[in-house]
Image (cartoon, rainbow, N blue to C red):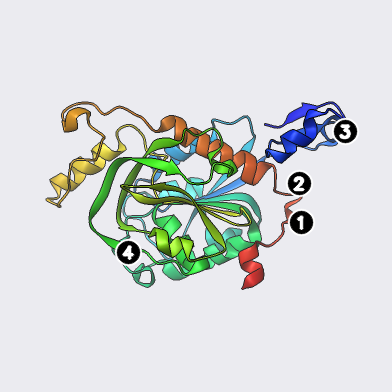
Amino acid sequence: MPVKIPEGLPAEKLLETEGIFIMSEYRARHQDIRPLQIAILNLMPSKIETETQILRLLGNSPLQIEVTFLYLETHISRNTSREHFDAFYKAFIDIKKRRFDGLIITGAPVENLDFEDVDYWDELRELLLWSNTNVYSTLHICWGAQAGLFTHYGIPKHPLPEKRFGIFRHEILDHLEPIIRGFDDDFPAPHSRHTETRKEDVQAVSDVKLIVHSPEAGVYLVVSNDKRKVFVTGHPEYDRGTLKAEYLRDKAKGLPIAIPHSYFPDDEPNRAPKTSWAANANLLYANWLNYYVYQKTPFSLEKLPASETAKQA
């Protein structure tokens, strides 16, 4: 939340140069408050589990948030009842004329397919382009990040020789970016994917910046120059037992799956895993809400400006 200071306080200019959100008494007296409108496109097969994980992170903030869950009509979910969608979700087509402060696009278990071969690709691409004019800031997760980087900037994904699976250490490349404010110099985060975004592909695009990279897991966090798009290739929202459930599921299916990296104590699947990434996940979402949504989005969503990507199209 912003810090309210007296008018003319000498610290004001220094705090502003550091990117700290300060608020004058005049602005505080004249500030209007409304809930942030956040849309969530949930593409994960375990809808309820993912809803809980993301809402837990969004709820760890003093900001008032109103959430709208979205689904794509061109995709039929086999793991969630029609009644659940009817009760809690809205079709993308039904909210096209609305505007949102923020949008979250989750991962999806379709990495091994070419983007164009995903059954709902055309509708998802339409939504991604719609976000340029109808959303102030979009947070893309895992495959959602790969889909966003490809759609907006032509950055491809590449197949991996084996699933990148487990908890990996990450290094911050730009300590001034607000999305990682408060992070340690290196930190753990979960990954679970069969494809990757390569460092050289990101760095070849001048409209985005690589913020966090892992020597083991590769690209982790990319931010557009106008701060309107954030791409996270991992799964910071995962619970303590999510990787274990995926490991046991793949083993039961007879799929080639290694023990998750740095997850089980002593790599013993019979031992309970410990959470090492939850604090960073909460900080990531809090920073996104505060620095990329709350501080930037207009009070009237009718005055929402188009993103730089839309202007260049």
Q: Secondary structure at mark 2?
A: loop
Q: Which residue is mark 1?
A: 303
Neighbour class for label 4 at 10 Å: few (<14), some, many (≥20)? Answer: some
Residue 299 is tagged as 2
Amino acid, disc 2? Phe
CB atoms of marks 4 and 1 within 8 Å? no
Asked whether, in this view, residue 165 is left or right of residue 72, the answer is left
Tell us which disc is closer to us: 4 or 3: 4
The answer for how far apart the CA atoms under marks 4 and 3 are is 52 Å
Amino acid, disc 1? Lys
Q: Is residue 34 visible?
A: no
Residue 25 is tagged as none
Tell us which disc is closer to us: 1 or 3: 3
Query: Which residue does the image show at 63% across and 56% down from the upper left?
Result: 226
Q: Which residue is mark 3?
A: 26
Q: Which residue is mark 4?
A: 158
The answer for how far apart the CA atoms under marks 4 and 1 are is 38 Å
CB atoms of marks 2 and 1 within 8 Å? yes
Query: Which residue does the image show at 60% across and 58% down from the upper left?
Result: 95
Query: Which residue does the image show at 49% across and 67% down from the upper left?
Result: 151
Residue 302, by quadrant, is: bottom right
